[in-house]
Amino acid sequence: MLPKHQRLRRSRDISKVYRLGDKAVSRHLVVRVWKSATLEDAALPLAAETGLEASVQKSSRRVGIVVSQKVSKRAVIRNRLKRQVRAIMAQLLPQLQPQVWVVINLRPGAEQCEYGDFLQELKQLFTQLEVFYGHS
């Protein structure tokens, strides 16, 4: 599970990533990444939500996961998919650059996808978007 300070929960934060971020698409996923230009952009929403220190806020990596009803009408399946992607992101988050906000959309057909497939696709998309350490 991702800690609260690493989640994108507000619709305006997700909209910001949609408007300003870069996009990469695979068979089952659409990943949008916004690399905040200033430290304040990444830290301000967190200051209101949590009482974290500024140093923690400034290195914020935040993730939002969106699974629409187009993927599956059943909430049980949508929630299972979100849990799988959340577990993968908890594993990959330390490898991402600081001040990065990520929104992951699952596409129709993702319900047949397994954990390993999600992991492989996310690594490929993050490499393509150059958000892993070692890219600038």
Image (cartoon, rainbow, N blue to C red):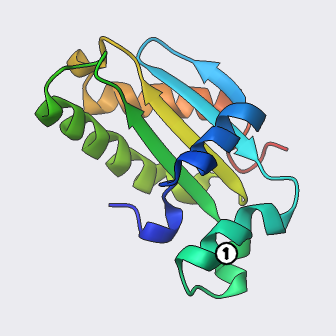
The residue sitting at 30% across, 40% down in the picture is 82
Horizontal relation, residue 126 to residue 123: left or right:
right
Write the residue at 54% across / 75% down: 49
Quadrant for the C terminus in the image: top right
Where 71 falls versus 8 (above or below)?
Answer: above
Q: Residue at x 18, y 20 (%)?
A: 73
Image point 60% across, 54% down: which residue?
Answer: 95
Instruction: Give x and y (percent) for residue 108.
Output: 33, 13
Q: Quadrant of the N terminus?
A: bottom left
Residue 109 screen position, x and y as percent: 30, 11
Q: Amino acid at mark 1?
A: Gln
Count of marks placed on residues: 1
- Indicate the quadrant where residue 22 lies: top right
To which residue does mark 1 refer? 57
Question: Relative to residue 13, is residue 129 drawn left or right?
Answer: right
State the residue in front, 105 or 112: 105
- Place of residue 51 in the rendered image (x, y in percent of width and height, measured from the top left): 56, 87
